[in-house]
Image (spheres, helix red, strand yellow):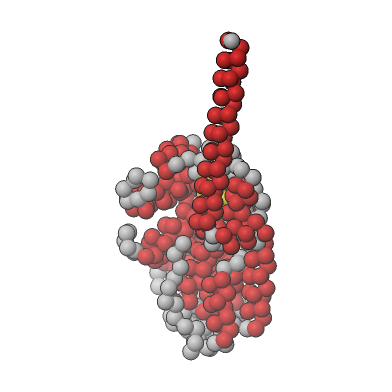
Amino acid sequence: RIRHAGLRSWRGQRGTAAVAGAGDGEGPAGKDRRGAGWPAVFLAGGFSAAAAGPKPSEGVHRGIMKICGACVRELPDDSYSVEQSRLRQSIRRCEECVAASNQLVLMKKGRTRSEGDDCPICQLPLPLDPLQSSLRMCCMNKVCTGCEFEAQKRGMWDCPFCRAPRSDESQILAMIRKRVVAGDPIAICSLGNQYRFGRNGLEENITRAVELYERAAELGVKEAHYNIGVLYDEGTDVEKDVAKAIRHYESAAMGGDVSARYNLGSEEHNSGNYDLALQHFLISAKMGDEDSLGMIKAAFMDGLASKADYATALRGYRESIDEMSSPDRDKAKSLGFEEILRTAAHNRELVEKTTASRVAREAAALSAALSKHHR
């Protein structure tokens, strides 16, 4: 998971959020940073002559003029996309209104984590720390370390979910490819990770990784959207394309991806859209993201967030952490992931030795019984 580093401080930005960009010539009504590019007619909560822009009779005669069905402004034809330009007036939307609608959807979707983020055994939301869960390649399910630890304590060394025998590294790639052939979206994304980082005998191949990520993203895997966003955002292995990265971050965030939501807040923060950044951080903080809570605290200290904002974020953060906690997970976390693996290997070795000893005793007893029978 890639997080934005080196965020500029909130300090010194008080009062700029509401005025930056206003009347900058990008549309008759200008832009208000409180809505990060939303038409003023939406921000005002109603319709006004000033927000509506020039009346049809006062329109600037530059080519063909068309009226937007949402903000009722008469705008040049190039203010609409090709698809929108062909629609009738009642359903026609200018680019500003389309962007505002998309922003509204972005803020309404992905405010909670999906059921796919729950451990399939204990049914609790998986911790955000990737070291506190593991992806089982046999069934492509993420299992928390708490359930894995408890299963191993009871002598179950196979997959805690599907009971498939534990595989070694030489079998992992074959298992993933088998699931890919079956059309498993998670397996497709996982194979992309193998190519991206050059694991399990594969050479690093970013082009192939992106192809697999895009295929998984089309099938609805939010992690694939997030991975594509990171690659294009960093621009180290592919050509840098921030706009494309943001589109994939938005798709991941609407699916409930916490890191994607945090990165969107970071992008808006670095672009000067502080109020919009705060809204993203509020959503991710309520889903248990500590970095987002830290950003809200910094905004509150600099006067860019209210006390109520910080209190709401803190309360939501604590509730989310409580939902992700359990005695088994706490025990596993106190031991550490590596310690769990060492304990599992040690216990498995003891079981194997005990089994071998029992088999040897049974064989000796059988041999003695056969000898006695022959005599």
The answer to whether 4 is drawn above or below residue 253 in the figure is below
12 shown above or below 253: below
Q: Name the quadrant containing residue 316.
A: bottom right
Query: Where residue 335 sits: x, y (%)?
Result: 57, 60
In this view, the residue farthest toward the front is 375
Residue 77 x/y as whole percent: 44, 66
Camera-side residue: 19 or 132? 132
Residue drawn at (56%, 46%) of the image: 347
Count of labels shown? 0
Left or right: 179 in relation to 367: left
Residue nearer the viewer, 311 or 275: 311
Q: Can residue 41 be seen at all in this image of the molecule?
A: no
**Is 120 placed above or below 326 here?**
above
Pick the front one: 38 or 18: 18
Residue 302: x and y, percent?
Answer: 54, 87
Q: Name the residue: 34% across, 53% down.
A: 206
Quadrant for the C terminus, please.
top right
Residue 332 shows up from this direction: yes
> Measuring 47% from the left and 51% from the top, which residue is drawn there?
217
**Going 55% across and 34% down the picture, which residue do you hit?**
357
210 left or right, relative to 99: left
